[in-house]
């Protein structure tokens, strides 16, 4: 077993884990943060995307021990419980950016990372290129792209980053 | 995934010692090749040696006439680096085409080269630019380093520490993605160097990355897409699979090479002196 200490959604967490535990398993099974999904488990679909030190990564392709000493944000950490949604979440709701919702946590975490890197004014082309690693089997992407463009703009006028 | 013991060395020397002491131990850098393979149980190393805590292994700097990139530099860092963008913009573009944003936040240049996937992008740049692969033991030229499918000259306790790219006058990389995997179905890197021109191909060769000398000779006489008119690449020895026949790949190599020359010509040419043979290019 390996002892790990990290920050998850702003809270310090310490645990003993088998080194082969994936970050996504640790989040879902140890911390019960089940908003992060496993779609493929083969690094393709992006349903498991979380932020590691503020950058989008696939938590199914990261060991929990590799997050030791780092900071992780999951979909649950974007907005406080009971508080208004994060602007990107709100944009997905408003623009109907989901159907079954399975891919949505990964889409939103990828979108927020995209805004951090490329700003609030995103072309459809940029959004589609950046969604390379996120698959949705329901929507056909059109509304996801609209949601992200609107969410990016809304993030510019929000305190939530 | 099978059980393993996890090691976290602070220096390259410590990492090498762990590799030496533990048979079948494996390095892990970004984990974006190794972990998927371990999850499928196609690899089951009893020891994993994590390079991500070794300080100073991910630097990007100019040394003399070369761009030196540390082994654990991530694809996203290379893509976004102002130093790379200024010295060898084609390399920054290549890094920005690898996988997707999340893959680029974890995957490293050292891991990509050590893996030597025949459809990976970096090998094309390393061979075209005549880069030197620096390890904890020695310096390797690409011709010695790449040894066929998923095979390199690396010894079990050998660790890539950095890669030194001589700065070319002009270069460009054009990638034609496999529609499913997004790796290169064919990728062509063209480099106009102070002394010669190199054209390399990834994705198509059954033995991994290779040079197209007929293109190189034609482009050395005249660095223009037209110089490649009428020169054909032989389909013999090229990959053929459900994504494309060998003939299709051979055709693509010609098309992409022309596009790469055009893209390189769209960039300003760097004024570089002829290389001085008495000066080693590696810092
Ligand atoms: C969905 C997806 C899409 C991808 N698309 C592309 C693509 O389009 N183009 C492309 O080129 N690649 C692609 N990749 C591969 C990606 O670039 C990998 O990150 C890279 O090949 C391996 O780098 P890594 O740091 O993750 O290595 P790891 O997985 O950590 O290691 C890979 C191998 O290299 C060894 N190793 C690692 N570092 C060193 C070192 N410093 N010295 C010696 N040996 C070392 C390890 O022991 C292991 O055998 C993709 C990967 C995924 C998951
Ligand atoms: S579950 Fe991680 S990429 Fe699909
Ligand atoms: S909404 Fe169902 S997978 Fe995207």
Image (spheres, rainbow, N blue to C red):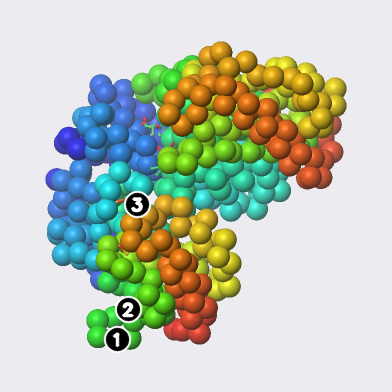
Verify CB contact (< 8 Å) between mark 2 and mark 1.
Answer: yes
Relative to A74, say whether A1 is above or below.
above
User: What chain is tagged by disc 3?
Assistant: A
Q: Quadrant of residue B228?
A: top right
Q: Residue at x 25, y 59 (%)?
A: A37
Query: Chain for mark 1?
Result: A
In the rendered view of the protein, which quadrant contains the C terminus of chain A? bottom left
Residue A83's disc is 1
Quadrant in the picture for the N terminus of chain A: top left
Q: In which quarter of the image is residue B68?
A: top right
Left or right placement of residue B172 versus residue B267 in this view: left
The reply, left or right, for residue A95 in relation to residue B220 is left
Q: Do the residues labelled 3 and 1 touch (CB within 8 Å)?
A: no
Residue at image position (66%, 42%) is B90
The label on residue A45 is 3
Same chain? Circles 3 and 1: yes
Give x and y (percent) for residue B257: 69, 31
- Who comes first in sequence, dot 3 or dot 2? 3
């Amino acid at each position: 077993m390996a002892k790990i200490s990290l920050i998850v959604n702003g809270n310090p967490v310490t645990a003993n884990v088998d080194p082969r535990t994936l970050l996504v398993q640790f989040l879902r099974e140890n911390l019960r943060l089940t908003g992060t999904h496993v779609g493929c488990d083969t690094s393709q679909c992006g349903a498991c995307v979380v932020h590691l030190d503020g950058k989008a990564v696939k938590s199914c392709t990261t060991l929990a021990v590799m997050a030791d000493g780092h900071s992780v944000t999951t979909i649950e950490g974007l907005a406080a419980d009971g508080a208004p949604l994060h602007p990107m979440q709100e944009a997905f709701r408003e623009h109907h950016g989901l159907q079954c919702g399975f891919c949505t946590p990964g889409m939103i975490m990828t979108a927020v990372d995209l805004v951090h890197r490329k700003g609030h004014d995103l072309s459809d082309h940029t959004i589609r290129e950046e969604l390379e690693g996120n698959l949705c089997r329901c929507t056909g992407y059109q509304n996801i792209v609209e949601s992200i463009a609107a969410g990016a703009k809304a993030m510019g006028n929000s305190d939530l980053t | 995934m099978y059980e393993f013991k996890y090691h976290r060395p602070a220096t390259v020397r410590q990492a090498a010692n762990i590799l030496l002491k533990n048979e079948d131990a494996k390095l892990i850098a970004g984990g974006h090749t190794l972990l998927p393979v371990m999850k499928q149980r196609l690899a089951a190393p009893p020891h994993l040696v994590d390079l991500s805590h070794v300080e100073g292994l991910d630097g990007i700097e100019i040394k003399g006439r070369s761009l030196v990139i540390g082994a654990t530099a991530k694809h996203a860092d290379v893509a976004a680096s102002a130093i790379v963008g200024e010295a060898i913009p084609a390399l920054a573009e290549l890094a920005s085409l690898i996988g997707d944003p999340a893959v680029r936040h974890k995957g490293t240049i050292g891991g990509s080269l050590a893996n030597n996937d025949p459809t990976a992008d970096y090998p094309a740049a390393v061979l075209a630019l005549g880069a030197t692969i620096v390890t904890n033991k020695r310096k390797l030229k690409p011709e010695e380093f790449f040894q066929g499918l998923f095979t390199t000259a690396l010894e079990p306790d050998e660790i890539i520490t950095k890669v030194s790219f001589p700065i070319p006058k002009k270069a460009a990389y054009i990638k034609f993605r496999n529609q499913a995997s997004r790796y290169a179905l064919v990728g062509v890197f063209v480099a106009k160097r102070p002394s010669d021109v190199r054209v390399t191909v990834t994705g198509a060769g059954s033995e991994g990355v290779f040079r197209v000398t007929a293109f190189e000779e034609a482009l050395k006489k005249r660095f223009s897409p037209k110089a490649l008119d009428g020169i054909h690449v032989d389909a013999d020895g090229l990959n053929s699979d459900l994504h494309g026949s060998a003939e299709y790949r051979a055709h693509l190599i010609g098309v992409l090479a022309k596009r790469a020359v055009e893209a390189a010509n769209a960039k300003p040419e760097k004024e570089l002196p002829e290389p001085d043979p008495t000066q080693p290019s590696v810092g």
